[in-house]
Amino acid sequence: MGFPKDFLWGGATAANQCEGGYRDGGRGLANVDVVPAGPDRFPVIAGQKKMFNFDEDHFYPAQEAIDMYHRYKEDIALFGEMGFKTYRLSIAWSRIFPKGDEETPNEEGLKFYEDVFKECHKHGIEPLVTITHFDCPMHLIEKYGAWRSRELIIFYERLCRTIFSRYKGLVKYWLTFNEINMILHAPFMGAGLYFEPGENQEQVKYQAAHHELVASALATKIAHEIDPENKVGCMLAAGNYYPYMPKPADVWEGMQQDRENYFFIDVQARGKYPNYALKEMARKGIQLVMAKGDEELLAAHPVDFVSFSYYSSRVATTDPDELAKTAGNIFASVKNPYLEASEWGWQIDPLGLRITMNALYDRYQKPLFIVENGLGAVDTPDEKGYVADDYRIDYLAAHIQAMDDAITEDGVELLGYTTWGCIDLVSAGTGEMKKRYGFIYVDRNNDGQGTLKRSKKKSFNWYQKVIATNGADLSND
Ligand code: BG6
């Protein structure tokens, strides 16, 4: 059987990691701009260190990124050449509403994305738009405390109404919040939350999450009202937990960790707070403030599809010795002794993708969309900028095969697949350029030096063939 004939093959990026042009076209400042590269990055994205302004001692990779703001035509043409059916990109909120709480949008920002979407269609590419991919205008952070304040729902609603109306007919696939569960792990990057000393951080995170969940349901409602053709998805940083040992306590721990992530999607896809989450919040002393009508809104406007990123499975244990050896990315997980890992320690598990797809489909019975997957690796180009990235081809081929198995053998419904960072871009976790995911090499290094010239890697032609054969030929020759 294989992939359905209208399967949406493509690639994914996020505004803050590729656009640059952070002051161009009337754009306002956002949290993602002031996050530095280097050792201060993690405490800042975790909301533990306050750096709301630029300083001379740090480098801020989002300011210029890969300059896609000025080069999008060339980049989209390359995506078209690969045969992309879809291109996932995000809107920078502060291009449309520079401060976030204005009544009137910034026409230059609106026009920019209109041109980008038109360019996509010129190449037969359907845009898939993330409304917020980690960005929040700085003014909303400084004046309202970002998503901890219910007023953010009003500003987000305004953003949604504006873009759904303006881009009607140009965009029909929307994602409300990128990796909504990231609010628990990287609250400043994910939701603009900075914690004051002594604050009850769990309370703030879950209250902010409630505001995002309401905003997401509202966005779904409005999207359908403005154009019944619109399809709205939620977005989860996915990857199922395995128990480290067959000990019931490890299995139980894995279930708890999965639920911490599922919680968001349970609300967005099933329309209500699950009992286990209400119990856990009560145990933690979290008191959610809900407004009249919130529960009805959540129930009435579940998402149309469930999208997710998948890089790796995860491992849960209660064993303190194993816990001490956790692999160091944003989602702490115990190391799986059966899996190899990328140069950044992210473990590689294609079967884990099939497991995750089945788990999500069993739970929600809604079409899935894989909107991020890929291998961050060090690429060494030759003098023409060519990279023989067989390791990336191997990684992607194995994951595409796992998707095929989930569709063909298990009957999972999958709308499409967009690989992460289809063109090299700035890493969200580390701020590096060196951690590359692309089919297209960009000449720029970690310090921001380089010509920004684009060149095709070996995987460019390979992915072109994969798309042309609708996933039937994954061979690397
Ligand atoms: C996801 C994000 O968490 O993973 C992306 O949605 C991010 O923005 C991607 O870039 C890969 O992570 P990293 O840290 O390698 O850039």
Image: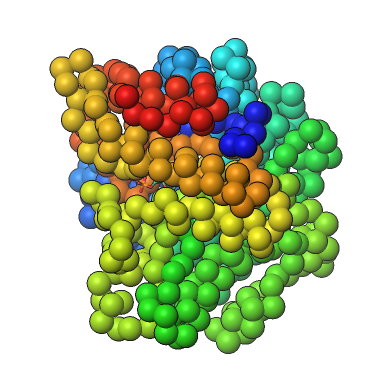
Figure check: 339 above or below 458:
below
> What quarter of the picture does the C terminus occupy?
top left
Q: Toward which corner of the image does residue 243 lie, by quadrant?
A: bottom left
> What quarter of the picture does the N terminus occupy?
top right
Please tell me which residue lies in front, 299 or 252: 252
Residue 295 picture location, percent across and down: 79, 66
Residue at 54% x, 65% y is 261
Figure check: 319 above or below 333:
below
Residue 426 appearing in the image: no
Residue 377 appearing in the image: yes
Residue 146 picture location, percent across and down: 55, 56
Residue 440 picture location, percent across and down: 35, 25
Figure check: 168 above or below 333:
above
Please tell me which residue lies in front, 424 or 306: 306
**Apparent side of residue 451 relative to residue 64 in the rendered image (left or right):** left
**Apparent side of residue 379 relative to residue 246 in the rendered image (left or right):** left
Residue at 23% x, 20% y is 385
Residue at 51% x, 21% y is 468
Number of numbered discs overlaid on the protein picture: 0
Please tell me which residue lies in front, 345 or 163: 345
Q: Toward which corner of the image does residue 101 lie, by quadrant?
A: top right
**Coloring applied to the structure:** rainbow
Please tell me which residue lies in front, 293 or 76: 76
Residue at 64% x, 34% y is 4
Residue 388 picture location, percent across and down: 24, 27
